[in-house]
Amino acid sequence: MSQRPYTPELFLQQATRHPVFDVRTPSEFRKGHIPGARNLPLFSDEERHEIGLLYKQQGREPAVLRGLEMVGPRLTEYIRQVQAVTDSRQVLVHCWRGGMRSASLAWLLGQVGYRVGLLQGGYKAYRKCVLADYEKPLQLLVLGGMTGSGKTEILHSLQQRGQQVLDLEGLACHRGSAFGALDDVEQPTTEQFENDVHAVLQTLQPEQPIWVEDESRRIGSVIVNDGLFRQMRNAPLVCIHVSREARVERLCNDYGSVSPEKLAGAVSNISKRLGGEKTRLALQAIADGDYATATHAVLDYYDKTYLYGISKRNPDRVMDLDPTPESPGAIAAALGKIARDVQL
């Protein structure tokens, strides 16, 4: 049998080369897991609940014996599931606190020749490491611009040009604003979003500029980590300026395939902020298939909100890309020059 304990930092390094098996329950895994890990639960949610009650009521030994009764018939299946995932004889395993669940699977895999790396302190220690890393300084550059300016496309163009990019909306599976969830893509939990963002940051050079879109604290249902959001608010903000007509055209293209019912629902969700007159105008325009008029009505609110947010920033940390080129590629090229010249 070959087992080796790893600190969270070393465990994540090893995870770039070897498969990770998370032996926690399915509900624990869904709430948050190490990106790329595979769930190989020793117990179901119901079984873990039963064992937990038994531990509290009768003590450790009865709980352990009951766990062995549950796991025993499934030992061969655990090995087969690992074999189905990888041909490698080196794997990584963890549970919640680095206790019996991960140690038990490591022992089993060791009996059939696997070399097993264990996460010291389990997923709990990993999460502590993730949250601590968010407090480390990053050289962020924030890309600002009114709704419909094509900021996501520009970020992708920046990345293609070799710039470091953190695409928060992509990781959140949400386009931002009340209309961001119209793709019907399930968002991660906030905890999983933090894990995913952390995994991307681990691939970037923190001492070099990292472009990120200007976001509110909440992106759909997920919340940006406090440490990261604080740095975003204090970082230099580069504002691009795209004409209202170009923005309306882009938004109509982006959302033109969405059903009128979903668009009307999104407008209704922000009706209190839009006001009665703008809401009625937008809803009637959607019903008439006049998406340009509806978009203009909604942009009145979003533009006002954006300008208010800019007014709350330190003016010494705000700069304009003026004039702003027309194409995303040309904008990205100009932003790349700023990244080389700006004092972070």
Image (spheres, rainbow, N blue to C red):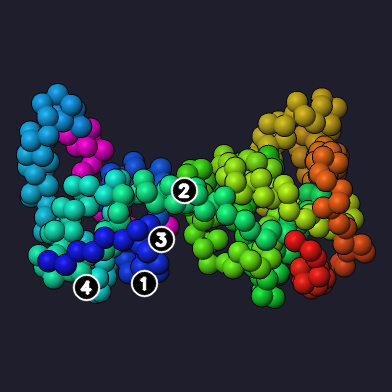
Q: Quadrant of residue 197?
A: bottom right
On-image quarter of the C terminus: bottom right
The residue drawn where x is 30% and y is 54% is 120
Percent from the top left, x then y, of residue 45?
26, 38
User: Which numbered circle lies on residue 17?
Assistant: 1
Give the x, y percent position of residue 9.
41, 60
Tell me what residue is drawn at x 7 percent, y 50 percent. 73
Percent across and percent down for residue 97 are 29, 45
Q: Label 3: how many residues lie within 10 Å, few (<14), some (14-19) or many (20+)?
A: some
Q: Which residue is mark 2?
A: 192
Would residue 54 be found to the left or right of residue 8 on screen? Answer: left
Disc 2 residue crowd, few under 14, some 14–19, many 20+, Cα 10 Å: many
Q: Are marks 1 and 2 in contact (CB under 8 Å)?
A: no
Q: Secondary structure at mark 2?
A: helix
Circle 4 crowding by C-alpha within 10 Å: few under 14, some 14–19, many from 20? some
Amino acid of disc 4: Arg
Q: Residue furthest right?
A: 323
Query: Which residue type does callout 3 highlight?
Result: Glu
Q: CA–CA distance between discs 2 and 3?
A: 18 Å
Q: N-terminal of the two: label 3 or label 4?
A: 3
Q: Is residue 17 visible?
A: yes
Circle number at residue 89: 4
Is residue 42 on the magenta stretch?
yes
Q: Which residues are drawn in magenta?
A: 35-51
Q: Residues within 10 Å of mark 1 (few under 14, many from 20)?
A: few
**Residue visible at 13% across and 58% down in the picture:** 107
> Label 1, label 2: how many angstroms apart (C-alpha)?
21 Å
